Amino acid sequence: MKIERVSTGIKKLDELLRGGIPKKFFVAVTGEPGTGKTILCLHFIAKGLEEGEPGIYITTEESRESIIRQAMQFGWNFYEEMSRENLIIVDALMREERDEWCLRRLTIDELIALVIKAKKKFGYTHARLVIDSMSAFWLDKPAMARKYSYQVKRTLSKWNFTILVTSQYAVTTSDAFGFGIEHVADGIIRLRRYIRGGVLRRFLIIEKMRQTNHDLRMWEIQISEEHGLELVKPIEMRKEDIALPSKVIKKIVEAKRRKEEEI
Ligand SMILES: Nc1ncnc2c1ncn2[C@@H]1O[C@H](COP(=O)(O)OP(=O)(O)OP(=O)(O)O)[C@@H](O)[C@H]1O
Ligand SMILES: [Mg+2]
């Protein structure tokens, strides 16, 4: 059976995914601050708009204005798309009382209700949804990550969406984070950053994509105003280059377990 796919808006990434993200998937974009999660999501929304698919963008850590300005730098006019009613940006940061598309409380129930309200405006057509970031909903209760992710995925699966959600990584513990969103998501696009020779370098790897073959290499990425986020070349990296020493990882995992037990 041929799988229907949705373009990410990044040509090379589509190739690595053998044509794009399978339609109606719930995909996590994870990574440390400044690695390009938001910019990847902007590509995804902009590509949908270009193809006539409406978009909903939930922003929890930046204001709507900030998202619009960032998109503008790459040549996407989100103001225009909003006024044509192709795009709804839900501001979950500013909490303006009079703003119809504003999330007043950071709860999963309010989030789902507002997303459904927005989707009803677009009708039955396929739409793209970004939740940037999902981790904002469980910051003070990390043990809820899995339950919340499951709730969002299950409830919204009936609404004809392909969904990207971002999630942050506090420390680079390589493969030590075994809980939460990663298990629920149909796919994981992992962004990373390292300082090598005094220079910040960023990387992307597809860690998981159900029902499809995909590239297994880590790619160096570049962000520029002309091209947005681009995959430059695959790199070879030894695990020792990127992981914390095993003693440190053990301590982090142990501390996490204790914290979850307390909750
Ligand atoms: N116009 C631009 N030209 C080149 N690079 C840019 C431009 N705008 C942003 N960047 C780069 O992109 C980075 C921000 O990427 P992005 O906002 O997608 O990160 P993020 O992973 O979403 O971070 P956070 O977790 O903090 O939200 C900036 O730190 C900067 O290096
Ligand atoms: Mg961001």
Image: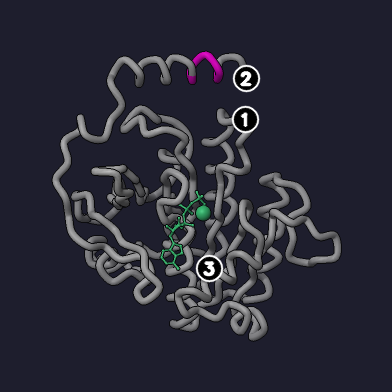
Comparing labels 3 and 1, the label whose residue is closer to the camera: 3
Disc 3 C-beta below 8 A from ligand 1: yes
Residue 11 rendering spot, x and y as whole percentages: 28, 71
- Give neighbour class at mark 2: few <14, some 14-19, many 20+ (Cα, 10 Å): few
User: Tag 3: Cα neighbours inside 10 Å, few (<14), some, or many (≥20)?
Assistant: some
Segment colored magenta:
256-260
Image quarter where the C terminus lies is top right
Eye-nearest disc, 3 or 2: 3
Compared across the picture, whether 173 is left or right of 58 comes to left
Q: Is the Cβ of the residue at disc 2 closer than 8 Å to that at disc 1?
A: yes
Question: Label 3 amino acid?
Answer: Gln
Q: Assess whether mark 1 and mark 3 are in contact (beta carbons under 8 angstroms).
A: no
Please state which of residues 195 and 232 is positioned toward the viewer in this rendering.
Answer: 195
Report which residue position mark 3 lands on. Answer: 70
Name the residue beneath numbered marker 1: 141
Vertical arrangement, residue 80 with respect to residue 100, above or below:
below
Q: Which residue is mark 2?
A: 263
